[in-house]
Image (tube, coloured by chain):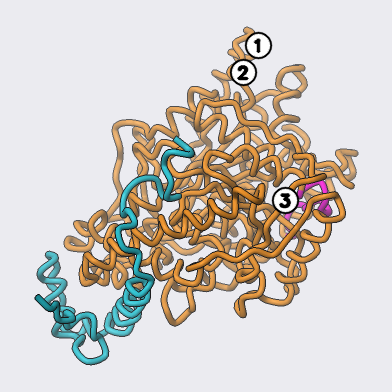
Chain colours: A orange, B cyan
Amino acid sequence: MPDPAIAFASIAALGARYRDGSLSPVEVTGLCLERIGAHDPELHAFLSVLNRTALDQAATTEVELRSGRDRGPLQGVPVAIKDLMAMAGVPTKFGSDPIFEERPERDAAIVRHLRAAGAVIIGKNNLLEFAYGAVNPRVGQTNNPWNLERTSGGSSGGSAAAVAAGLCYAAVGTDTGGSIRIPAAYCGVAGLKPTYGLVDLDGVSLLSWSLDHAGPIGRSCADAAAMLAGLTGQPVTATAAELAGLRLGVIAAHRDAPAVTPGVRAAFAAACQALGEAGALLEDVSLDGLDHAAHALMQVLLPEASVILGPRLLRHAEALAKQTRAQLELGFALPATAHVRAQQFRRYLGAEFLRLLTSYDALLSPSVPFEAPIEDPPIDEASGFGELLCSAPTNLCGLPSLSVPCGHGEGGLPVGLQITGRPYGDEFVLRLGAAVERLMPPVPPPRFIARGAADCRQHGCGDPLGRRAV
Amino acid sequence: MVLAMCPINCPEAQLDAAMICRLARLAGLELAPARAALLLADLVALIEADRRLAALDLGDCAATGDPWGRSSAYA
C-alpha cells in the first residue's frame, strides 16, 4: 500500500508518479477504497462504493499507461460522481428512499466522458434528496470532515466531503442554487459551477431545466480544471492568473448582508486585501435587482421541479422528506405567470452582470454567508434564503462561478470566496482561483483525519495539497 | 377593456388553503386542505415576490434565450 499521504496529492503529482512508474493506479485505487472503508462510516459521503469495477478500471488504465496509451491527466485517477448521475448497471439512489431507486442501462454523458479520459469511478456520492435541499431521514446527511457534528452542505455534500477527506481526488456535483459551491465552501475545497450548458446533463436526474449545472469539485483549482477538461473534452488549465492590473468588482450587497457572520466577513476581507496587495484593483459594485434573486430562483425552480419530480410525489409522497414533499406540492400551486416573470427577471439580472463584467474581469463575494451549520437550513422565506444568498444569482444568470477556500471563520471551519466570470470564462475563473490559492495559507487536510497530514509532513511532502506556500 | 387584478395577486385577501387546493388540482395534484394550509405562508411570500418582480416593469424583456440575457455577444 502506498504512503497514506498520497491520498492528498494533486492530480498532476499523481499523474507524474504514474508516468515515472513509481506509483500505480491499482495501488492508489486500493488506498482510496481502504480510506473509504475507514472513514466513510463517520462521513457518510458515499451511497455506493464500486470496489470491484474501480479496481478493474484501475488495472485497465495501468496496462494502458505501461503500453504508452496516454489518455491525459485523469487517467487512473480515482474520482466520484453524485448519485443522481446514471451509471450503467449501478443503482441510482438520489439520496432518497429506496423505493425510488433506479438501475440505469446506460451511462450519463458525464460518465462517458470520465471513462474516455481514463478516470477510475470509485463510487457514487451522497446528496440531499433529489438535490432539492433536504436530507431524507432514511439516508442521513453527509457529515463535515472538519467537524463531524456539522453538515458538509448540499446538495453535493457527499462529493465535497469525499474530496476534502482524501477518499478520492475529485468529484462531479450538480448546482441548481449553489449545490456545488456551498459544500465546497463548507468543506474547504474548490467547486466550480460552470457556464450554463457547458457540461452535458444527459443522464443526470434533473431538478430544473433552467438552473441545473454539473461541475467539478477538487482539492485545488488545478484539480477542478483537470476534471472540467475531462467533462467537456476541451483543454482547461488553471495556471495562476497574473493579478497585476486585474479589475475585480466586490459585490457589496453580499459582503455586507446581515446574514454574513463576522468570521466570514473577516476571511473575505483578508482575501480581498491580499488580492489588492498583489496588484489587483478592487472596487465595490452593485447590481440592480440583486435582492430579488433568491425569490426569483424559487419562482423558476419550484414549478420546474414539480413537473420533473411530480410523478414520484404522486406515487410515493410519504416516502419523501417532509421538506421535499412540501416544495413539490408548492410548485403545483404557483401561477405560471410567476415562473415566466422570473424567467424575464433572470435575463434582466444577467444583463446587469454583463454590464459589470465589461468593466471588471471578475466579481467577488463570499460563497456562503456562514460556516457549515449543524444541518442544512431549509430553502424558504423564514430562513431568509441565507445559504443561497450569494450563489443563487449566478444560477439564474448561467455565469461561471467558483468557490475557492479563503481561510476559516470564527468556528474554525472553512470559508469560501466566490469568483464569478463572463460566460464561457470558466478557465479564467479557475486561474483566478488558483491565484487566490497561492495568496492564502494552504488548506491542511481536515482535522478528523489529521493523522494523514502528520504522515505527510513526516514524509517530507510539504503542503499535502500540493499547493505552493507563499 | 380594464383588466381587474386576479385574486391570487391579492394574497392577503384571497389566498387560503381552499384556493391552494384548487390551484394544485388544476395543475394535476390533489392536496388535502391540511397540507394546503401548510403551504400558505410560503405561497403568499412567493406571490408577493412575484408582485415585486412585476413592479420592475420588465416589459418585453425576453423570457427565453441565454440566461445572461444577451445571446449575440457570447454565441
Which chain does tag 2 point to? A
Tell me the element at label 3.
Answer: strand
The three-letter amino acid code for the residue at tag 3 is Arg
Q: Is residue A65 left or right of residue B22?
A: right
Earlier along the polypeptide chain: callout 2 or callout 3?
2
Q: Quadrant of the N terminus of chain A?
A: top right
Nearest-to-viewer mark from 1 and 3: 3
Verify whether residue A446 appears in magenta.
yes
Give me the C-alpha separation between circle 2 and circle 1. 6 Å
Residue A55: quarter of image: top right
Are the residues flagged by discs 2 and 1 in contact, CB closer than 8 Å? yes
What residue is at 72 percent from the left and 30 percent from the top?
A12
Residue A171's x, y, as percent? 55, 42
Same chain for the residues under marks 2 and 3 in the image = yes
Q: Identify which amino acid the numbered label 1 is placed on.
A: Arg
CA gap, disc 2 and disc 3: 45 Å
Res A149 seen here: no
Write the start and end of the magenta stretch as one range.
A436-447
Q: CA distance from mark 1 to mark 3?
A: 46 Å
Q: Nearer the viewer, residue B15 or A188?
A: B15
Residue at figure coordinates x 22%, y 65% from the top left: A336
Q: Residue at x 80, y 63 (%)?
A: A270
Residue for badge 1: A66
Residue at mark 2: A62
Chain letter for the residue marked with disc 1 in the picture:
A
Question: Would residue A280 be counted in the magenta stretch?
Answer: no
* Residue B68 locus on image (x, y percent): 45, 50
Residue to which mark 3 is pinned: A247
